Image (tube, helix red, strand yellow):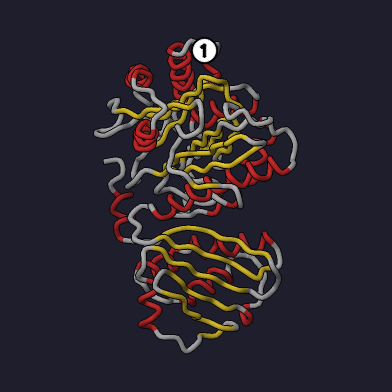
Amino acid sequence: MDGIKVIDGGVTAPKGFSANGAVCGIKKSGKDMAMIYSTAPCEVAGTFTTNLVKAAPVKWDREIVDSGKKVHAVVVNSGVANACTGAEGLEYCRRTAAKCADAFTLDSEQQVLVASTGVIGKQIPIDKIEAGIGILKEGLAGTREAAVLAAEAIMTTDTRKKEAAVSLNLSGKTVTVAGMCKGSGMIHPNMCTMLSFITTDAAISKELLQKALSASVKESYNMVSVDGDTSTNDTCLVLANGEAGNVPVTEEGPDYLAFAEALHQVNTSLAKQMAADGEGATAMFEVKMTGCSTKEQAVTLAKSVVSSSLTKAAIYGHDANWGRILCAMGYSGAIFDPEKVDLYFSSEAGTIKIIENGVATDYSEEEATKILSESAVTATADLKMGTEEATAWGCDLTHEYVSINADYRS
C-alpha cells in the first residue's frame, strides 16, 4: 500500500518502547528471557491458541486482554513452556507479573503480560525468572541492539531471529508498527508454536486494534504450517502506546485501513520468516490458490497443500511430483473441477507450467528440478472458477526435522 515503508527495526522502533534480552539460566545455554516495556500505558489486543490445552501464560494474557486493561510490559521466557502445570503454573505467571510491576512501580500485576515457550510439562524456575526481571530492567534500552537481544532471547529451535518493521503517515504524524516473533516447529494453521509481539506508537482504540489484529491473523499466521501440530502456547499480542501523536483512530475510515494494512504487512513478514525457518527446513514452500469461487475455498485448498507431508517431502527432493498437490487439493473438502486446474512451479530460477486442465504438460523434468532447487519455491494453482485467492506458507520436510524432534527434551 502506498505510504507504508519497510524500515530496519524491531520492537523498539516505535516511540516509547524499550526492550532487552538476557541469559538468566533457564536454558542450558544462551539468552532465555526478554522484556518489552513502554512508559506510557498501552492498549492491547491479542489472539491465542485454539488448542483445548492452553498454557498458563495464555490464560493469564487472555484475561487481561479481555478485561480491557492497559498494560506497560511483556515478560517472556524460552526453554520452558509453563504448559500443563496446573494452578502452580498460573501462580508463577502472577508472581512474574507482580515482580515486574514492582520493579516499575506499576499499579497492578495485571499491567504486565507474560509468555513462555519451550518444553511442555515442566514448572518454570520461578526464582530464575524473578531474578531475570531485575537483569532485564537494568539493561533495558530503546536501541536497535536492544530489540535484537529481545528477539534472540525468545528463540527455541529457531535458527535465526525474526523481526519486521514499517512506518506510515497518519493524520500528518509518522507512525511505526514493528514486531518480533519466534516459531520453527509445532506450527500449524489456527496459530502455531509461535509467540509474536507487535509494538506500535499509533493512537488507536482497543476495539479497532483487536479488529485489525484478528483480521490480519487469518491471512498471516493462520496460513503457516510447518508440521501439522497446533501448540499450547500460541500467542500474538499488539501493544499500542499512542506516542506518535496522531489523531486517535476510533472509527473505520482511511486511517484505520492504512494502519490495518501496515499491521498486516508486519504480520505477513513474520509469518513468512517462520515458514522459512521451519525445523530442519531447506526451503520455504509457498502455495497460492487463484481463480477460486470463494475465499473459504481458496484458504482450504492452500492450507491442505502446504500441510501435505508427501508434498513437503517432494519439495525437499526437488521433485515435481504434481500428483501429490492435486491429491491434497482433492481431499481438502473443497469442491472444484480437477480437469480445469492449471498448476505452476516458480522460484528465482524461473516458472514452469506443470499441468493444464488437470493433465501433465510436456514440461522438462530437468528445468522443473532446477526451479525446485531454490531456497524459496512457489506452487500456484488456477481453478478457473472465479476471482478469489489465498496464499499459505510452509517448508519442506527433511530428515533433520525428525532428528530435532526426536531429541528435543534431551
**Percent x, y for residue 322?**
48, 76
Q: Is residue 398 left or right of residue 179?
A: left
Residue at figure coordinates x 46%, y 30% from the top left: 115
Please give the residue where the numbered disc 1 appears in the rendered image.
106
Q: Nearer the viewer, residue 295 or 147?
A: 147
Residue at figure coordinates x 53%, y 47% from the top left: 5
Observer able to see residue 217: no
Find residue 319 and report its image quarter.
bottom left
Find residue 77 and report its image quarter.
top left
Question: Which residue type does callout 1 highlight?
Answer: Leu
Badge 1 marks a residue whose secondary structure is loop
Q: Is residue 23 left or right of residue 371?
A: left
Observer able to see residue 201: yes
Q: Quadrant of the C terminus?
A: top left
Looking at the image, how many numbered discs can be counted on the residues? Answer: 1
**Percent x, y for residue 304?**
54, 62
Q: Nearer the viewer, residue 26 or 207?
A: 207
Q: Is residue 84 left or right of residue 318?
A: right
**Percent x, y for residue 184?**
39, 48
Q: Is residue 337 left or right of residue 98?
A: right
Q: Residues within 10 Å of mark 1 (few under 14, many from 20)?
A: some
Q: Nearer the viewer, residue 164 or 313?
A: 164
Judge whether 84 appears above or below 377 on screen.
above
Residue that extends furthest to the front in the rendered view of this protein: 172
Residue at figure coordinates x 52%, y 21% from the top left: 72
**Percent x, y for residue 69?**
62, 21
Residue at figure coordinates x 55%, y 11% from the top left: 107
Find residue 367 and report its image quarter.
bottom left
